[in-house]
Structure formats: C-alpha cells, structure tokens
Image (spheres, helix red, strand yellow):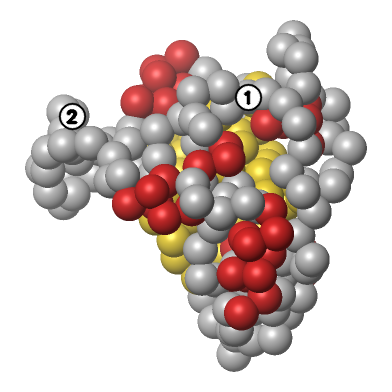
Amino acid sequence: MGKTYERISGRLRTFIEAQPIFFTATAPLDGAGTVNLSPKGLTGSFAVIDELTVAYLDCAGSNAETIAHLRENGRITLMWCSFQGPPTIIRIHGRGEPIFRDDPRWTQYVSSFPEIDKSSHGVRTIIVVRAEMIRDSCGYAVPLMTYDGDRELHGQRFAREDDASLNSYFEKKEFIAASLDGLPALPLPLPPLPDPAPTLSGAPER
C-alpha cells in the first residue's frame, strides 16, 4: 500500500538521489491541451535543495513543454522508479518554477549542481519544484533493467555551441519559444550563461 511522507529525507532522499533517471509530467489548464511526459537523466543534473524542494537542470532540446506549463500553472509531478533492487516508486506532486539565466537566483541554484559541466549541455533553465505531496508505491510491475551509464551524445552535441549559436538553434525550433499548444515557453533571445558564483553555503533563498 502507498504511504504519504511529510518531507524528502532519510530513505526517500537516498533512493531518489541514487536513481539515474526520473520522469516529469505537466499539462496546460486547457483540457484539450497536450499533456507532457519527459524522461530526465544526466548524472549530476538533479539536486535535493531542502526537505521539501528539489531542482533539476533543464538542458537543450527541441521542445520546451515543461517550461510552458509551469509558466502557465505551475503544476508538476516527478516520478522515480527502481529498475534494480527492491521495487519502489516515488512521486513528488507539487508546484514548479523555471529559473531562467537572467534570474538573480540563478547563481545560487546552479551551485547545487557541482558534478556536471553546465556549458556542455546547453543548460537553459533550472526547474525548481516545491513538494505538496510525497508518496510511494510498490512498483511490483516495473521491470528489472541494468544501468550501463549515461549516453555521451548530449554533451558531445551541445559542447560545441556557445551562447550565440545555442540561441540560434533555439530560434530555429518551432516549439521552443512556444509550446505545442502555443503557450509562452523559453524566452528568447537566450541570455548568456552567467559566470559561476563562489561556493555558497545553505539553500538558495526563495
């Protein structure tokens, strides 16, 4: 039977930080709009900020549905499931916000991801999620699969882009500035990637 938790700590935190992949789900307010479900990987691109807040790096791609939906209504669900070890599924239902490169909070939040080269993946936003409900379930039907490692293709593709060429790449894509349903998504032109800030202690201010 599923259980509800008050915070992201202990066994829950250990589990989600150990998973090499998680999934995000968002939707527009319009009932006829397009529901979006995305897999997220890349070692070092996810962080637990505090017991009710998590964040992940939103990297270059050909769509920006999550950004658009969060800008419109903020609703998001994150899901982790174990493909190895004891069967477990954990979901965080909450409210999310895209932190753009020109947001004064950028340098504080980006310091939570020291293990990944931000310049190699075309990081365009940081998605911050505040948990409103945290639940687990059994995961008995999730198959056993082996994790062999991250693909190198994303880093290889976007490491050769600078801020100007990355902006040109986004401007050529149909569903970056606006979602599939025409909602405002990633603001363009893309601001330059800020210089790294000195190491900060404590969680970012919200």
Q: Mark 1 points at which residue?
A: 112
Residue type of the residue flagged with mark 2: Pro
Residue furthest toward the bottom? 32
Q: Name the residue under label 2.
A: 86
Q: Is residue 56 visible?
A: no
Which quadrant of the structure image shows residue 188? bottom right
- For residue 43, side relative to residue 76 (left or right): left
- For residue 25, side relative to residue 126 (left or right): left
Where 160 falls versus 200 (above or below)? below
Tell me which residue sits at (46%, 39%) in the image: 135
Of residues 37 and 88, the one drawn nearer to the viewer in this rendering? 37
Tell me which residue sits at (62%, 60%) in the image: 166
Which quadrant of the structure image shows residue 169? bottom right
Of residues 131 and 71, the one drawn nearer to the viewer in this rendering? 71
Q: Position of residue 206 (x, y in %)?
A: 84, 33
Q: Which mark is residue 11?
A: none
Residue furthest toward the right? 104
Q: Is mark 1 on a helix, strand or loop?
A: loop
Q: In which quarter of the image is the N terminus?
A: top left
